[in-house]
Amino acid sequence: ISEGMICAEDELGVGDSHEGIMVLPDDTPIGIPAHEYFNVEYDTIFEIGLTPNRIDGGSHFGVARDLNAYFNLFKPSDICLPGVSEFKVDNNTRHIPVIIENESDCPRYSGLTISGVKVKESPSWLKNRLKAIGLSPVNNIVDITNFVLHESGQPLHAFDADKIAGGKIIVKTLPDKTRFITLDEEERELSSKDLMICDADKGLCIAGVFGGIGSGVTEKTCNIFLESACFNPVSIRKTARRHDLHTDASFRFERGSDPNITVWALKRAALLIKKLAGGEISSEIVDVYPREIVKKVVEVSYDNITRLTGKEINRKDIKKILNSLDINIISTAKDTFRCEVPTYRIDVTREADIIEEILRIYGYNNIEVPQKVNSTLSFFDKPSKEKVVNGISDMLSGAGFTEIMSNSLNPSAWYLESPDFDNSRMIMLANPLSSDLNCMRQSLLYGGLNAISRNINRQNPDLRFYEFGTVYFLKKNRQAENNVDNYLEKFSLDLFITGNKKPENWNNHKEKTDFYNIKSAVEIILQKLKFDYDSLTIKERKQDYYSEGLELRINNSIIAHFGKLRSYYLEKQDIKQDVYYGHIEFDSVFNMLQKHTISFSEMPKYPSVRRDLALLINKDVKFEEIKTLAFKTERNLLKQVGLFDVYESESLGKNKKSYALSFILRDNKRTLTDKIIEKVMKKLVDVFEKEISAQIR
């Protein structure tokens, strides 16, 4: 049976020795807690996880300050930093001036000199407090700087004053690749962007990150220069990452330290050093602060507090909460107030941050959850034409299209020779500069084809163009001559696709563009413009420009057409490869968009069901015909019809083909049963057999 464990001093946490067993006197009471017998300071330790924006909580005082703000709601209390009123300068014999060459990276630098100190081991209370938070004691000077750091959140650094050459401190950068040995005895290669604390000859310390071995405090040190500064977070973060040095100081500086606590921290540390290491304060505090960092002022609306928190909090409570957080209200109006945010709260910069602070201290749990959740929907402005055009342009450019801008003056021969244009509506120029530019364009078609021809002649055959532009006509019912009302302008969007789908490389085989590329482009544009493609009427178009084409209608008005251009137009521009063309009546489409209302619907609660059919049909039957027929047959449960396979073979019969179709069914009020699904599918099959002579495969 074990009667206990024999331990060394370090294992019990009462000393540093591990050389032998710790022998206790015979009269030591059995069962007494070790911390009582050895008079070790004992306390409860809390580990707090900080978010990067709340570095103000990275100290004991910062945590206490936040807790006090909450406790103030129940019982008035006050909290303050330890007093430094006893601080006084004993003499001014070791004044060390400070020069800041890089003010953007070091907005404030404070320091003072203490002479005649005795570097030795720290007293037990100080060592125990540092050990309790996971720090190893070094000596009384270094331990005091660490103590003040964790007490107040302000990093400090002590230099051996006798090692400061030239008797001055310079905050600057050093040339690239300068060698510097840090306290861990590692030689590091500096960047010209690393901020350094230097003397007249050399670097002493990597600012805000790590000290140098040549200027550190040792047992032989008698005179120290104590630093308390504020550094640029971005500069410190980059330096710490560059050298893979992550210290307690860099942790705080790279998140943003309070520039207005540097002098207090100096005084606090100086008083502790005089008490534990002796010596005299032998210089006035040097405080270089070129541009004072002032407190931020934020305006807050009481209505916004209510809107964002969901509760009307008493205005007296709001003021009490903010005052307890050191956020002072400096002026008030009927429905608003202006408040001043302390410099240590780098995370509070706007109205929403102030409201978050109020809610945090007031208590999220004190906000009642209503029976009904009220939501405020955003107000949607009517779209402007310019924004819509820019949005479509960005989308097309991202899809590989290039915008072109063609001349609005064209040769009249282009239109006179074509049977697809109404020559009576052509606008001729009264005094043309040449016969090649003697009429206003009736279409963007010729300008796009001309651009394609030029590119192909310059060995650039794979093209995707789009153009927004205005076309011009004489009205059909014209009034007297030279009347401005006789003229009509239309704004259009035209698309052109030709050549290979993708640039040729080892991973892409040559694949020509086809009808479905232009169809897809037009569909995507219309969907962007809030059109439900399934609600459009689609008709075949074999007139005008196309050898094969489709037109899209809504309420019997044509809004777009697209297809493969006839060889007639290609030969006119000496183009020897297929070109696919799309035209969108943008004025008409935009007018419809203006009338579009945004509606919201509940997400479906019940699952959808998919059923597939393979239909044997005549070759002249189009998928669109089947789709239209399906939705006419089942309007309530049918949500989507898709074509996922086409099969053609002589084995199917003369002029026959097979379509594999998918049907998505869903009821918004209940889960569909097999009985209901089969009933719908039977109804669809019956209609297909009757209307298009389909056979189920």
Image (spheres, grey):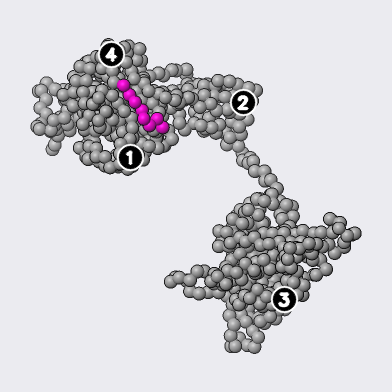
Q: Which residues are magenta?
A: 97-104
Residue corresponding to mark 4: 92
Check disc 1 and give the amino acid type: Ser
SS at circle 1: loop
Residue corresponding to mark 3: 542
Q: Position of residue 403 (x, y in %)?
A: 61, 60
Q: Within the image, what quadrant is residue 11 found in?
A: top left
Q: Residue at x 30, y 36 (%)?
A: 174
Residue corresponding to mark 2: 336
In this orientation, which residue lies closer to the viewer: 617 or 374? 617
Check disc 4 and give the amino acid type: Asn
Residue 192, disc: 1
Q: Residue at x 38, y 37 (%)?
A: 235
Quadrant of the image for the N terminus?
Answer: top left
In this orientation, which residue lies closer to the viewer: 442 or 105? 442
In this orientation, which residue lies closer to the viewer: 421 or 595? 421
Q: Is residue 98 magenta?
A: yes
Query: Is residue 64 visible in this depiction of the protein?
Result: no
Check disc 2 and give the amino acid type: Thr
**Mark pair 2, 1: CA separation:** 48 Å
Q: Residue at x 84, y 59 (%)?
A: 486
Which mark is nearer the camera, 2 or 1? 1
Q: Earlier in the sequence, mark 2 or mark 4?
A: 4
Which mark is nearer the camera, 1 or 4? 1
In the picture shown, does residue 265 fall above or below 647?
A: above
**Mark 3 Cα shell of 10 Å, populated few (<14), some (14-19), many (≥20):** some
Q: For the residues labelled 1 and 4, say whether their Cβ atoms are less than 8 Å apart.
A: no
